Image (cartoon, rainbow, N blue to C red):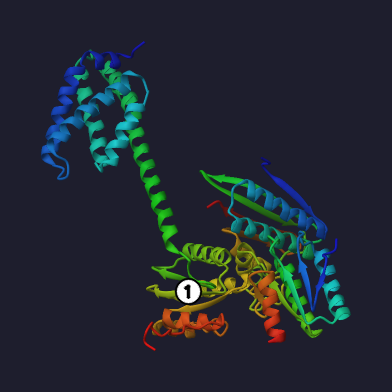
Amino acid sequence: MDSPVIAHLKEHKDKIVELWMKKMDEAAAEAPQSNINYKALITTNETFAEVIYNYILNDGSSRNLNEFIGRILQFGWPLSYLTHGIQVFRRVVIEVIGGKAENTKELLQLYQQTDAIIDPISNKLIHDAAEQWENTVYLQKNALMELSAPLIPVMEKISVMPLIGTIDTERAKLIMENLLEGVIEHRSEVVLIDITGVPIVDTMVAHHIIQAAEAVRLVGAKCILVGIRPEIAQTIVNLGITLSDFPTRSTLKEGIETALKMTKREIVFIDQEGSD
Amino acid sequence: MRTQSCIKIKNEWNIVQARQLGRDLSKQLGFQTVDQARITTAISELARNIYLYANDGFIKVEPINDMGKLGLKVVSSDKGPGIKDVRKAMEDGYTTSGGLGAGLPGVKRLMDEFKIHSQEGVGTEIVAIKWLR
Amino acid sequence: MRIPILKLHDYLLISIQVELDDQTAIQFQQDLLEKIHETGVKGVVIDLTSVDMIDSYIAKILSDVVRMSSLLGAKVVLTGIRPAVAITLIDLGITLKDVPTALDLEKGLEKLQQELEG
């Protein structure tokens, strides 16, 4: 059996929707969304009202609502549009059906029942939006992780890992794992870690890099640290760390030359055809 | 899935049992290979400490769920002599050649959370957690 | 349980395929030293590809055996240490600083050949 509020909602649907549309329109006029055109707003408002009604009358079947929320957020509409819509809906419903109450007790009951019907919608809204954002953040974090430490096999036996950006503990762990897995996968004998793109090398970062180099040695390859700027050299010395186990070079180019020597190879220039 | 497992550490062979338990459980929970190795190694260190310094004790391994965050909890407890100076025991030795006893700070680094409670003459309890990434 | 030690030309090859308990590790240390003494080889490769965990105790036994072997005149190379194992060793603060390493058995043998013959 329908609660009185549901009955009222059915009975006064046209009036409620009309009033709601009007208020949504007013709100939009007061604070226009620059990136949303007026026509789209009207259509969306109509759908929104329809979706809310369907949700309430079908008693919790949330498919349309899900779809609608998903679409709105995907198109980049602000969550505040949705929450505001629900708030206005609540107000309109109270305004329309509140007058039907015969005494305070009944009025209070109408209020409570309205809340019981509308609260789940706004909870769902927030839940869905939060989930969608979490999902996005998760995907971006993963994408960032993948980008964050690639090991590039530049030639047989030699790989380069260019590090760009700030290195925190979590990233350092990832770098270490990628580095070692890559060494095994490409059968690299020498790995160049290029820290040209690392803006700050503090004691912590230096420590992580040295640990990575030590781990590389354990799996049976060698590390060369390249891209060392003067201030980094200072940090390393101030740390009291001797890097005698790992060759260091100031540029990637010199590093590659060293790596070639370590793998007993060299670059030779060949005469161009016809020059002799 | 087993919800909790406990191994009594009395001899060298129990150390192997304890780490096999940790290896199995961390694999079941879906830890990546590196974290599996971390957990297994941490358990081995803790079990060895019991064997070397406390004669006997327990290693307890259980999955945990903290508001949706999954992890593995390792508890090492013994009624051994206890650690006189916990802070000192948690200091890193500069040489690794000592091998034995380099354990505790290492275990702390292998795991995400580490709590130690020790009382001289009463015993030691260590709780270490690794969260699923 | 005993870990088999193979002799190939002037080298000893060991591939550790079992879970290393303390007893096995100590036994292995002893067996290897005796074999070096008996055969007079100058190079040893210990392959750890199948080992998925090295704790501080096993690490100590391994680094000890490398130093003991060198006292007997044999150079030892550890090969095939897995990434996960390397990372846990570093976490433990163990770098096996003076222990030679190589990617795999083949590269380990190459390394010994270069250093002993070349």
Among all residues in the image, which is located at the extreme top?
A: A1
**Residue C100, percent across and down?**
67, 78
* Residue B6 horizontal/vertical position (percent): 73, 48
For residue B15, what is the image quadrant? bottom right
Assess disc 1: are there few (<14), some (14-19) or many (≥20) residues with their C-alpha within 10 Å of its C-alpha.
many
Task: Provide the residue designation for mark 1.
Answer: A193
Name the chain under label 1.
Answer: A
Q: Residue A223 sits in which quadrant? A: bottom right
Along the horizontal axis of the image, is B107 left or right of B12?
Answer: left
Q: Residue at x 75, y 78 (%)?
A: C66
Q: Position of residue A186 (x, y in %)?
A: 55, 66
Instruction: Name which residue type carries label 1.
Output: Ile
Residue name at image x 36 percent, y 33 percent: A124
Residue A168 as seen in the image, left or right of residue B39? left
Q: Which residue is drawn at 51% across and 43% down?
A: B68
Position of residue A264 relative to residue A16, above or below, is below
The foreground one among C93 and B114 is: C93
Which residue is at the front of the view, A196 or B117? Answer: A196
Q: Is mark 1 on a helix, strand or loop?
A: strand
Above-or-below relation of B33 to C11: above
What residue is drawn where x is 21% and y is 19%?
A98
